[in-house]
């Protein structure tokens, strides 16, 4: 069995080729290069073309039994029936709907109603609010079909307008209880009647069209699996498809997720409730993670290579300022798009490495806030599985265990979302998801250092104080 997983992530195109006979997983990744200035409002066809080209290169003229598609949650674009983009794809970092969020948040009853129905907070990251932004800009949202990167790739390859409940659950337009497009939210938000893609089961496939076959260099008729989200596929990739296993992914953004047997709605509205490919997910996420670390590396350390930075980092209880990781606004737990990042307690002796370590700590303190909220809602997990770019830094990986105060299983596979799409693809053919070369067993465990517990608890309290003091009015 050979499966090609294509992924349109926040910053990169990815192509992962799996061969069960050879037990190999071969990965290609390339940062997107767009013609427009704002990568958070990108052209859907430019993104798709770069993903398809990377997939064609990865195949090197070979064939596959299945192609799977993965994209981020929270993207939205309007597409015409003949496959033309009517708007850019607005991704989760796009902040244009902040004004919509601020206005809607004035109505506490609406906020709780919306959250209770969709599992999504009234937040600028969600497509529902971005659509309202479009309406206020004069866009006729009924003129096109509401889609995202994953849906666009599926439509371009198969000609079909379809999505999955897992991908749709991050839109603010899916009813989390009956798992169907919500029939009241569009009207309540003044969006009018929206054209929505058909919701199909996660393992649905459609044939590659003759016209699209050239883009991948594959025969027409090759099965293309319906698109899914990176976060949902991450659960599958980590083998975390049952309650008790929490995934902890640290990529461009950071997220913690655990499978739930029913919708989990936080009374404080501090978490979200989406769908995995097969059930409910209770989770919390942050907008700032490796993107924030990239920022401090580029602006403070002159773009130094991470391999050069790592040996210089100071292990132990070190003097660093407090950092609030909200360059892109806050997602969980406070859902405040008006929050911004910054250093608190900056002193003359703090050099570039101190600022770098403060940023790494701040990201993890925000994730610790999320972890506490999830544990209160779902109970303590049996295991926590860490994945993402954090694993390329032994220093940051250990800091994650120290700040969370918990053992962290280290994921075996890179690109867990693409691997999860492959594993789901295997089950679509009735095969075991633990195929050769796809073991979900951890490659190691990061244990917290008890000698640093008091230090990080004190640092976390300082972070919480700064978090409260810098809370902007909504």
Image (cartoon, helix red, strand yellow):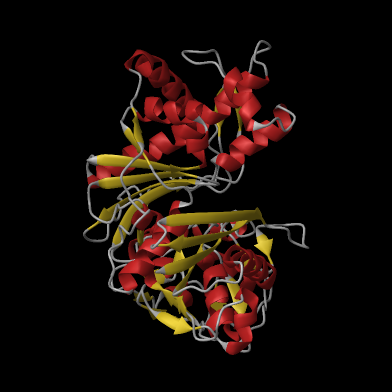
Nearest the viewer among 327 and 428 is 428
Taking the image as shown, residue 231 lies to the left or right of residue 319, namely left
Q: Give residue 141's position: percent from left, percent from top.
A: 59, 79
- Residue furthest toward the front? 22
Q: Quadrant of the N terminus?
A: bottom left
Q: Is residue 130 above or below residue 178?
A: above
Nearest the viewer among 371 and 437 is 437
Q: Give residue 90's position: percent from left, percent from top.
A: 62, 64
Taking the image as shown, residue 335 lies to the left or right of residue 304, namely left
Q: In which image quadrant can residue 277 be found?
A: bottom left
Nearest the viewer among 105 and 378 is 378
* Count of all numbered marks drawn on residues in the image: 0
Q: In which image quadrant can residue 219 be found?
A: bottom right
Q: Is residue 6 above or below residue 238?
A: below
- Residue furthest toward the top? 349
Q: Give residue 69's position: percent from left, percent from top.
A: 49, 68
Q: Give residue 262's position: percent from left, percent from top.
A: 23, 61
Taking the image as shown, residue 22 lies to the left or right of residue 351, namely left
Taking the image as shown, residue 466 lies to the left or right of residue 120, namely right
Q: Is residue 145 visible?
A: no
Q: Is residue 147 above or below residue 468?
A: below
The residue located at (77%, 57%) in the rendering is 37
Q: In which image quadrant can residue 8 be found?
A: bottom right
The residue located at (39%, 75%) in the rendering is 182
Q: Is residue 364 visible?
A: yes
């Amino acid at each position: 069995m050979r499966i090609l997983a294509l992924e349109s992530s926040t910053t990169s195109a990815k192509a992962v080729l799996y061969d069960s006979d050879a037990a190999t997983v071969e990965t290609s990744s390339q940062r997107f290069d767009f013609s427009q200035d704002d990568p958070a409002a990108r052209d859907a066809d430019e993104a798709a073309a770069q993903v398809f080209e990377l997939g064609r290169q990865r195949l090197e003229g070979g064939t596959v039994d299945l192609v799977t598609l993965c994209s981020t949650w929270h993207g939205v674009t309007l597409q015409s029936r003949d496959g033309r983009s009517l708007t850019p794809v607005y991704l989760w970092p796009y902040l244009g709907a902040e004004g919509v969020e601020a206005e809607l948040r004035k109505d506490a009853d609406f906020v709780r109603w919306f959250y209770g129905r969709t599992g999504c907070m009234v937040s600028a990251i969600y497509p529902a609010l971005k659509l309202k932004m479009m309406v206020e800009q004069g866009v006729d949202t009924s003129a096109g079909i509401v889609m995202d990167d994953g849906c666009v790739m599926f439509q371009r390859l198969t000609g079909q307008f379809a999505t999955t409940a897992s991908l749709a659950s991050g839109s603010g337009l899916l009813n989390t209880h009956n798992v169907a497009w919500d029939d009241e939210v569009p009207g309540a938000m003044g969006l009018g009647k929206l054209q929505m893609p058909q919701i199909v089961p996660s393992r649905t496939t459609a044939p590659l069209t003759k016209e699209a076959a050239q883009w991948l260099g594959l025969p027409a008729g090759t099965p293309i699996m319906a698109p899914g989200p990176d976060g949902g596929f991450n659960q599958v990739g980590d083998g975390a498809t049952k309650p008790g296993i929490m995934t902890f992914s640290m990529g461009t953004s950071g997220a913690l997720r655990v499978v739930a047997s029913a919708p989990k709605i936080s009374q404080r509205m501090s978490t979200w409730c989406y769908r995995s490919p097969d059930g409910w997910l209770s989770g919390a996420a942050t907008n700032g993670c490796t993107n924030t670390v990239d920022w401090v590396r580029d602006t403070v350390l002159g773009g130094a290579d991470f391999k050069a930075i790592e040996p210089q980092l100071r292990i132990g209880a070190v003097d660093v300022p407090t950092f609030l990781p909200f360059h892109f606004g806050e997602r969980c737990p406070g859902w405040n798009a008006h929050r911004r990042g910054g250093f608190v307690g900056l002193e003359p002796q703090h050099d570039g490495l101190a600022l770098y370590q403060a940023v790494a700590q701040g990201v993890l303190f925000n994730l610790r806030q999320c972890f506490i909220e999830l544990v209160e809602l779902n109970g303590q997990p049996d295991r926590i599985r860490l994945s993402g770019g954090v694993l390329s830094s032994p220093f940051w990986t250990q800091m994650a265990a120290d700040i969370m105060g918990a053992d962290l299983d280290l994921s075996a596979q890179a690109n867990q979302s693409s691997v999860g799409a492959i594993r789901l693809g295997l089950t679509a053919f009735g095969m075991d998801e633990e195929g050769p070369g796809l073991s979900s067993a951890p490659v190691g465990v990061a244990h917290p250092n008890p000698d640093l517990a008091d230090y990080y608890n004190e640092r976390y309290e300082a972070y919480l104080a700064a978090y409260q003091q810098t809370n902007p009015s909504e």
